[in-house]
Image: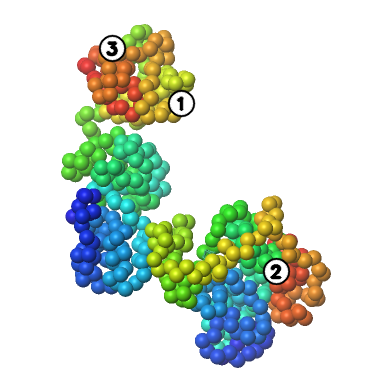
Amino acid sequence: MYLSKGQIEHESYDSIVDECIEKHGEFLIAILQDIQKRYNYIPEDAMRKLAKKLGITLRDVYGVASFYKAFSFTPKGKHVVTTCTGTACHVRGSSKIVDAFSNELGIKPGETTKDLMFTHETAACLGCCAIGPVVVVDGDYLPKVKTTAIRKIIDGTKRGAAILEEEDQRIFPIQVVCPQCNHSLMKPEHLVDNYPCIHVTISFKRKHGWLRLSSLYGSFNIESEHDIPVDTEVNFFCPHCHAELVGSSTCPECSAPMILMLVTNGGNIQICSRRGCKGHILDI
Amino acid sequence: MNIKIDGIRVDIPEGFTLLEAAKFLGIEIPTLCWHEGLSAWGGCRLCVVEIGEGERKKMVTSCTYPVEEGIVVHTASEKVVKSRKMILELLIAQCPTSRTLQDLASKMGVIQVRFDPKWENCIYCGLCVRICNEQMMARAIGFVNRGNKLEISTPFDKNSEDCRKCGGCIYICPACTLRCQGINQDNVLCNACYNSLQPTCISNEDNYNCWMGLKNECGTCSKEESKNI
Ligand code: SF4
Ligand code: SF4
Ligand code: FES
Ligand code: FES
């Protein structure tokens, strides 16, 4: 049972703590597990009540509870996504998956989103290295997770269950050229998401450098010479003719200027120039 | 129970620890986490001694090891002295500002610390937890978290209602009280109290009896050797 924050505040822990003690007797860890199951974390007041009722000091309860990583003293999200960062998963790139979750959810590992929907965690080896990199969502093990699937996992989890399909129909690679000089912007030597990347030059504030975008439609992974702070509007340029890749419209989501590139087999793609915004328009 | 400590045969009642037996004989064993009136904990490992003979020798903490019939104990064999020094080096690296530790270093002739100093304020000896628990009956502070996040704290890091503000924990802490001021920045050892006398005894053997009743502790006989470790 998951209680929202408001409910928790109004709830007195007495009855729940009593119930748990009745069920498990004096077995502290079992009681703590039960409390955690009900509230998704162990509230401080519940722990105080528990100590009083069991006749042991709060120090002892706290000492036991803090010893185990499984117990949390801050509210956890409705959904918990755990990425394995064990050795086997690490060499298969789980750190990128962790980064992708951080990007998508906007929180660091160990944190919970403000709306209490997601808790983002890492674990050191989940014991199923053969199917790594592994992500566990609410107890479901997802094998061989790719960074491109992260968004889907999150959306799926919100809707009910995280389903991991082998190929996402909405994710496909595209090839683009500069609208001015018609040179290809693709750079096959460099791979992002395992596909040749789109290579452009950028400038923001007083910095200039290269930027590599994933050519997978639907993936927002980038590599950049400079760290681009979130919310910065970035100017994109063609690395061949140095013309600015500027579109005519503004972003439908945040109304920053759009970047325009032509898709080789006809049509164009516009992406938002503001870091962190995922606004884009594909016209084929 | 008949036991043999450093070659001395002695009859010690059951239930005593090796440390107590050694004390009874006036043999000094350095201790840190052991305190009269508190339960023995065996956390600091400074009181290690070697028991058994030949192949079956092993190191145990004397403050927790009970006497056994016929047990043979060496409180200051070369191995024991070497390990104690290493343990003390590790402890000093954790908390170089502790005067208790620096004094022990001077006494035991530790003249180098080969580990990066951490400048922590706690060596996890557990004395404060035990005094609060066993003598003050307050149980206000305890070990929190685990592994490299371990710390001594009150629940939720808030002022504890159980604390009697007796100050016992601070009194007993080897790291908080008596700050050593003379730390040498090169090797985090103070050694202000270190003396450079000639060894007062002739040789350094497993079962020797220093005429001062010391066992390497005065440091003079082990100074040369400690340079070689
Ligand atoms: S001062 Fe408080 S925490 Fe320290 S020993 Fe006394 S009761 Fe325990
Ligand atoms: S605070 Fe002091 S007495 Fe307590 S464990 Fe740390 S070093 Fe020992
Ligand atoms: S390393 Fe990820 S499951 Fe073992
Ligand atoms: S005094 Fe024996 S282990 Fe600390």
Decide if residue A189 is in sight here: yes
Chain bearing mark 3 = A
Pinpoint residue A257: horizontal percent, then vertical percent.
Answer: 31, 17
From the viewer's perspective, is the residue at label 1 or at label 2 nearer? Answer: 2
Please name the residue shown 28% across and 37% down the image. Answer: A150
At label 3, counting other C-alpha atoms closer than 10 Å, the crowd grade (few under 14, some 14-19, many 20 or more) is few
Residue type at mark 3: give it.
Ser
Please name the residue shown 46% across and 74% down the image. Answer: B136
Disc sitting over residue A248 in the figure:
3
Local secondary structure at mark 3: strand
Residue on which the image places disc 1: A225
- Mark 1 within 8 Å of ligand 3, using the beta carbon: no
Looking at the image, is A154 positioned above or below residue B32? above
| Quadrant in the rendering for residue A167 | top left
Pinpoint residue A179: horizontal percent, then vertical percent.
Answer: 32, 10
* First in sequence: mark 3 vs mark 1: 1
Disc sitting over residue B107 in the figure:
2
